[in-house]
Image: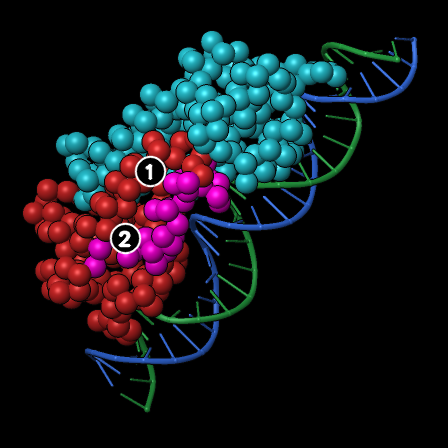
Chain colours: A cyan, B red, C blue, D green
Amino acid sequence: MIFSKACEYGIRATLYIAHQSLNRERATLKDIAADIGSPVAFTAKILQQLTKNNLIDSTKGPMGGFHIAPEKMKNTKLIQIVEAIDGLDIFTQCGLGLKECSETRPCPVHDKFKPVRNGLHEMMDSTSVFELATGLEQKLTYLKH
Amino acid sequence: MIFSKACEYGIRATLYIAHQSLNRERATLKDIAADIGSPVAFTAKILQQLTKNNLIDSTKGPMGGFHIAPEKMKNTKLIQIVEAIDGLDIFTQCGLGLKECSETRPCPVHDKFKPVRNGLHEMMDSTSVFELATGLEQKLTYLKH
DNA sequence: ATAATTTCGGATAAATTTGTCCGAATTAAA
DNA sequence: TTTAATTCGGACAAATTTATCCGAAATTAT
């Protein structure tokens, strides 16, 4: 809906990896997909993308898997995951899909839609992977199906 | 993005029809598609859906076309157009796509996402086709590409 | 070294959304 | 009553997103 399925999986996977990393445990592709309930091969693609964008770290071979250093978690905001997968358009695009929608030439819903869109933007831009991973750690929130 | 392309076209088409209807002019499929910049045949499908849902009225034959009575415009909210095309899921669904996300078992972004989603819901639920059509009428807002 | 375990990357397939085509049905005007 | 203009509805096609498959590359342990 708001985000693509790929992006939803990407955020969930990142939070799972972060949670595991807080406990000094590696996360393998299999574990991740099993835990967040996503198709394994599709999840692999998304993780590759996140790795390329340097949002998570991967190591190959036995004992390999995915990992995020606590420092990195603190500096990574949700918006960066969205940017890596869906792009940032959602935070600037017209609610009715018009290209020429702006302050000076607003579409009919512009004034009412903008604060909503900005609210989402602000939220994603200010929320770190770390704070959400600690929510999981404290069992205040849940990822599993 | 937020809404499907079909839904964007649906809202734009409805507002165009409403605007025309305020001036006692009919809107034909051709006019609508040309004006809002949408593919003709695809737009036809969407208009059929809106007609079935009784959000707009259609008449066949020469001098036919689409129309909305001012009274109906006043009673029609944007959310009804979304409901007819995309459904209402977007206003209740988890931001991370989890089925079991709720107050008692929230996903990691639940608390932060909910107000944004509710803001969108409230906005779409309180905004009438009539008020947006009058914005077009007064040239305060624009639909054209 | 060899084998086992993992991610990487390319090709492909399935599902969904977006878009097209065309004849049928309806209606108004000539 | 014929013709033209319109929406309706079904089948189909293209594009995009979601998902699968499989061999290659890297790394660890035996």
Mark before the other along the chain sequence, 2 or 1: 2
Give the alpha-carbon distance from disc 2 to disc 1, as whole Å: 17 Å
- Whether B85 is drawn above or below A108: the answer is below
Q: Main secondary structure of the magenta part?
A: loop
Q: Residue at x 28, y 46 (%)?
A: B121
**Residue C15: x %, y % from top left:** 58, 50
Q: Evaluate whether residue A42 shows in this view.
A: no
Label 2 is placed on what type of residue?
Answer: Ile
Mark yes or no: residue B139 visible. yes
* Residue C21 in the image, given as x and y percentages of width and height: 47, 60
The stretch in magenta equals B76-104
User: In the image, is A54 to the left or to the right of C13?
Assistant: left
Q: Amino acid at mark 1?
A: Lys
Chain letter of the residue beneath label 2 in the structure image: B
Q: Horizontally, is D16 left or right of B63 in the view?
A: right
Q: Where does label 1 land, which residue?
A: B114
Magenta span includes B83? yes
What is the crowding at mark 2: few (fewer than 14 residues within 10 Å), some, or many (at least 20)?
many
Residue marked by disc 2: B79
Residue drawn 58% across the image and 38% down it? A37
Q: Nearer the viewer, residue A122 or B32?
A: A122
Label 1 sits on a secondary structure element that is helix
Nearest the eye: B126 or C13: B126
- Percent coordinates x, y for residue B130 in the rendering: 14, 55
